[in-house]
Image (cartoon, helix red, strand yellow):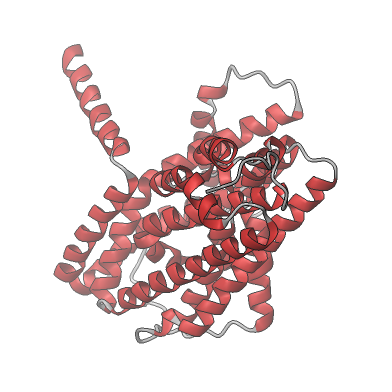
Amino acid sequence: MISQDAERTAGRQGALGWWRATPLYLRILGAVALGLVVGVTLGDQAAALETPAKLVLRLLGALAPPLILLAIMQALMRAHLGGRKALRLVTLLLTNTLVAIGIGLLVANVLQPGSWSNPAPAHPPAKAATGADPLAQFLDSVPKSIGGPFSDNGTVMGVIFIAVALGVALRSLRHHEVRTVEDLVHVALTSLITILHWIIDLVPLAVFGIVASIVGVKGFGDFLALGGFVVAVLAALTLQAGYYLIRVRLGSWAPPLYVLRGVRDALVMAFSTGSSTATMPVTYARLRENVGLREESASMGALVGANFNNDGTALYEAMSALFVAQLLDMHLTISQQFIVVVTSVVASVGAAGIPEAGLVTMTMVFKAVALPTDYIAMLFTIDWFLDRCRTAINVMGDVTVSCLLDGKTRERPETRPP
């Protein structure tokens, strides 16, 4: 009996291990393919499959505010800032992010990718009540925010959800010493990121459900618009890359093509891993060894600045908000687009260390302008690809900041770049 239980446990661990070992983008592609088949097969009956997507979005929405809060706190506490170069660094980071968001909004307003298909009604008609839905009741018991269950209208089930999640996540950190405030923030952020990894494991299930429900109920029209959105984002990221090269040409001693050749390993790694944090050591090394920047300039741009510089992510979030508004035939005014800019800037600060940061912070951007977060699930289907593209742009932004901090005079003028 014991050996049979052990075999079953090993089998479950093996399946879970295989699931996590498979790259996320392959799991998402498989979910998209299966969702297309199921949606076409079931038709309108596939509408019920959107519940997993709603669950994932509810969990992401609950985690987003504390994750951003702790990530910004940790980034500010660990950043070694001081002197005139620190002020110059902050100015460059803010300027690059604002330009990125401006480019994103411009391209989204000009190309109008959300209008490439028949727009869905802004407020779909409510379904007739058909009795208690167990799945809906379960979804309602999942807290919308971590602090929600502790309010006057909170539910005991919501408190239990949070207690179980944090209790399991903190098991691996229960012996971690907390001697300083920074240690406390680190433990809290690490526990939330652990929970976030669990939610990311559910993303393919959400993709399957949302693809099947959209195809079954509305057909392929929304995915035609989604293709237009991919084109628009790639065009905006290309313009942002061109802006970086112009800035390097005008504000640094290093020729732009020489810089690109020197840091190509970092850009390829950023695209392949989808993580600017994991790429930081490579970016710093290539800036020092291949490009020849000063140590202070390379470290402030590639190491310190990388914690705050997420231009590609901010651009993507702003474009996503406009895309969904266009898809729903909702007009975002200039003031609402300004709110998108401000929220995207704030949400992008410190997001470099958060896995799948774009999906986490996007919930805050959507809520800021009263857009339905349900449509974020549709973006899951293409986010795995665009995430790598915008991460490469994030790293290119770090490189640009380092070059601009280094100035127009090279440290070793006796050697010239080829």
Q: Is residue 212 left or right of residue 307?
A: left
Q: Nearer the viewer, residue 184 or 74?
A: 74
Q: Position of residue 2 (x, y in %)?
A: 20, 12
Viewer can see residue 304: yes
Residue appearing at x 62%, y 55% in the figure: 348
Q: Position of residue 364 (x, y in %)?
A: 59, 61
Q: Name the residue at the front extreme.
A: 414
Which image quarter: residue 299?
top right
- Point 66% across, 53% down: residue: 253
Judge by depth and name the residue closer to the eye, 225 or 394.
394
Q: Residue furthest right?
A: 83
Residue 317 pos. (x, y %): 54, 64
Nearest the eye: 281 or 115: 281
Q: Is residue 189 above or below residue 246?
A: above
Quarter where residue 332 is shown: bottom right
172 w.r.t. 276: above or below: above
Q: Residue at x 58, y 55 (%)?
A: 255
State the image coordinates of residue 59 (x, y, percent, origin top left): 49, 51
Let me know if residue 147 appears in the view: no
Identified at 51% across, 64% down, the residue is 316
Which residue ends up furthest to the left in the rendered image?
Answer: 41
The answer to whether residue 146 is above or below residue 211 is: above
Q: How many marks?
A: 0
Location of the N terminus by quadrant is top left
Determine the image quadrant of residue 381: bottom left
Q: Is residue 295 left or right of residue 169?
A: right
